[in-house]
Image: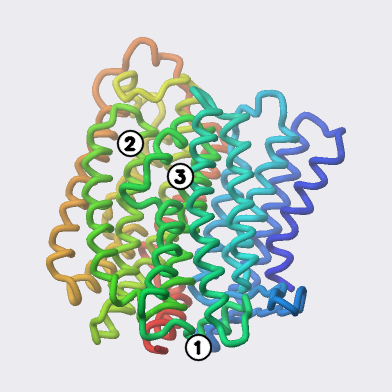
Amino acid sequence: MILTLAWTLPLLGALLLAFVPRWSAGGPRLFATLVAALSLAMLVWAWLGFDSGGPLFQHVLDVPWVPSIGVGYRVGVDGIALAVVTMSALVFLASIAYPVDTKGQPRQYYGWMLFLMATSLAVFLVLDLLLFYVFFDLSLVGMYFLIGRWGHGKPQLSALTFFLFTFAGSLALLLAIIGLYLSLDAPSFDMRLIIEQQPLAGGGLYAGLVFLGLMLGLAIKTPLVPLHTWLPQAHVDAPGPASAILAGVLLKMGTYGMVRLPLAMLPDTFQRYALVVGIIALVAIIYGALVALGQRNLKRRIAYTSINHMGYTVLGIAVAASFSDNLMAKQLALTGATVEMVAHGLITGALFLICGSFWQRTGEYDLDYYGGLAHQAPLLTGLTVLAAFASLGMPGLAGFVAEFQIFAGTFAVYPWLAVLAVLGILITAGLFLDLLRRLFFGRLPVHLGQFTELNRIEATVLGVLGLGIVIIGVYPSFLLEVIDGASALLIGGR
């Protein structure tokens, strides 16, 4: 029941905002923040009641819905889902509380934010494959309207591109889900049953096609090169908080889906293609870092670093799926991939909120427009430095914990992939140091004389995300213990 409350509370909140027309000026934002906080509290409660040494899925609720085709209302979490969904709820809370120009439509804006929160959390909580697809698709609707109605530049074109690309991926995912469903002796959409039965074990062309459909749909969402072209412009034109959710939460649906569907349900087939997936991940790592380095637009640069970091996550998943009999290395890589999802959500969420603060003050993302802000806005400078150093993998911060495990696991299985992927970290370090130099150091331009420091709410929200980044970096065991149990069962339970 706790998990059901976690995603239905935002949905009820969205309905109230939609159908109750009279709100005070700041009412919708305050109401949405309280609802998001309650939803996060439900997940923290679920975390406190989670047994790391217990069964794979816990807090399970299974209610028959359409028994004739095997559909049920099924929710539950393993350690991987619990970590990702709790991070997602925190990023939503931060994004909703963060100041933004709602263009005179706060009730509609926060209504769509809560709708997007409900559908996104449900993706990570459901254990029914059909419901997973339904919520996976519904999340597109919320983001489409947030970009199209509250974005800037060419928001409607960016929203349409985002929707068409990711919807095409969803259709590939749907075909694969139908193929997987029909392969069962007793057709059911119960994820636990499919994981237990391993219906397409042994491979073959049919299994390969189902795997291809799943991976294609999830790779567009992640996104992996060369299926990433919808992402940069969507980020540039979206409002800052929507960008934080897009990078922090929606991209994780792709990598989380790779763990929950092909890795858990088609491990034999994934083994055959693990090296290919690992090579594609390496291309995303190097390509994302190199292209980010060449960007003058602040938001576009951070968007390309997301492609780079999602490459690390997919590399860890590919290692976990490999032929290697080194179970410790595979578990290390899978745990690292999950920590990377959590760390990237917090870090990039903070970076895109910071981008929103720059836009609110100047309406400009061009890095050449800025400079010398370290004395003008020291708090903004400090929090940006923290997030940037975490993103480039500095020890003591969340990004290092994730990348160390991914690289350690990869080195034991595909050492040449690990060596080449290290180049991505080197380039990322260069691009973030260059970004900090161009924003905050040197002489302050005359036109930035009135640039204001972060206000109290901005500083509090970014401070909370920064605290999470530091806690995971300094004391990661609270997170690793929850994830390790699920990783061990997924790797060793075959």
Label 1 or label 2, whichever lies nearer to me, is 2
Location of residue 462 with respect to 51 vertically, above or below? above
Residue named by callout 1: 53
Residue named by callout 3: 350
| Residue found at the far top of this picture | 446
Total labels drawn = 3
Q: How crowded is mark 1: few (under 14 residues within 10 Å), some or many (20 or more)?
A: few
Secondary element under disc 1, as helix, strand or loop, is loop
Indicate the amino acid at tag 1: Gly
User: In which quadrant is the C terminus drawn?
Assistant: bottom left
Please say which color scheme the image uses.
Answer: rainbow
Can the viewer see residue 63? no
Q: Residue at the spot x=40%, y=14% of the render? A: 449
Kindly indicate the quadrant of the structure image that contains residue 187: bottom right
Q: Nearer the viewer, residue 378 or 321?
A: 321
Q: Position of residue 402 (x, y in %)?
A: 33, 64
Indicate the amino acid at tag 3: Ala
User: Which disc, if any, is residue 301?
Assistant: 2
Kindly indicate the quadrant of the structure image that contains residue 412: bottom left
Q: How crowded is mark 2: few (under 14 residues within 10 Å), some or many (20 or more)?
A: many
| Residue found at the far front of this picture | 205
Q: Residue at the spot x=63%, y=79% of the render? A: 188
Secondary element under disc 3, as helix, strand or loop, is helix
* Distance Cα–Cα, label 3 vs label 2: 14 Å
Mark 2 or mark 1, which is nearer the start of the sequence?
Answer: 1
Mark 2 or mark 3, which is nearer the start of the sequence?
Answer: 2
Can the viewer see residue 20? yes
User: In which quadrant is the N terminus drawn?
Assistant: bottom right
